[in-house]
């Protein structure tokens, strides 16, 4: 899973030719840390079909504000450069997998 900062967001997410799940999180967030292994697993599983990137809301507060991230973890699904779905909070892998399957 790639760590994306504000200066990379345009290229890595908005201009991506495959769907992107953006994990807005923070190092101090327990539920965010719990989601890490789940997202790593999904990242490997969907390699080439979709990608998963992580945005630290403390390092990229501008992105958190732009996408109205009020709590973390907050996972926003992008397709063709636009947000199309979102999941807030720690959720089971199969829940995210169902949402990913709709996008790919």
Image (tube, rainbow, N blue to C red):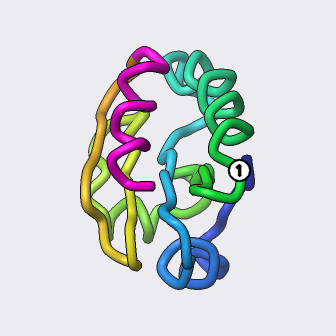
Which corner quadrant of the image does residue 60 belong to? bottom right
Task: Please give left or right for residue 82 compared with residue 96 in the image.
Answer: left
**Residue on which the image places disc 1:** 47
Q: Where is residue 47 in the image (x, y as percent from the top left)?
A: 71, 50
**Image-quadrant location for residue 37:** top right
- Residue drawn at x 62%, y 34% as measured from the top left: 42
Q: Which residue is drawn at 74% across and 54% down?
A: 2
What SS does tag 1 mark? Answer: loop
Q: Is the magenta stretch mostly helix, strand or loop?
A: helix
Q: Does the magenta stretch include residue 9?
A: no
Q: Which of 54 and 43 is in front in this view?
A: 43
In the image, residue 40 sits, relative to residue 63, either above or below, namely: above
Tell me the magenta residue range.
Answer: 92-104
Q: How crowded is mark 1: few (under 14 residues within 10 Å), some or many (20 or more)?
A: few
Residue 84 image position (x, y, % from top left) = 25, 61
Residue 98 sits inside the magenta stretch: yes
Residue sitting at x 30%, y 33%: 88
Q: Position of residue 69 (x, y in %)?
A: 31, 51
Q: In this view, does 30 lie above or below 11?
A: above
């Amino acid at each position: 899973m790639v760590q994306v900062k504000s200066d990379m967001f345009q290229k890595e997410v908005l201009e991506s030719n495959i769907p992107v799940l953006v994990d807005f999180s923070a190092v101090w967030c327990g539920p965010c840390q719990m989601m890490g292994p789940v997202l790593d697993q999904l990242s490997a599983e969907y390699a080439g079909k979709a990608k998963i990137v992580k945005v630290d809301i403390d390092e990229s507060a501008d992105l958190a504000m732009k996408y109205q991230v009020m709590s973390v973890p907050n996972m926003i699904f992008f397709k063709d450069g636009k947000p199309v779905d979102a999941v807030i909070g720690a959720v089971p892998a199969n829940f995210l997998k169902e949402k990913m399957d709709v996008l790919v």
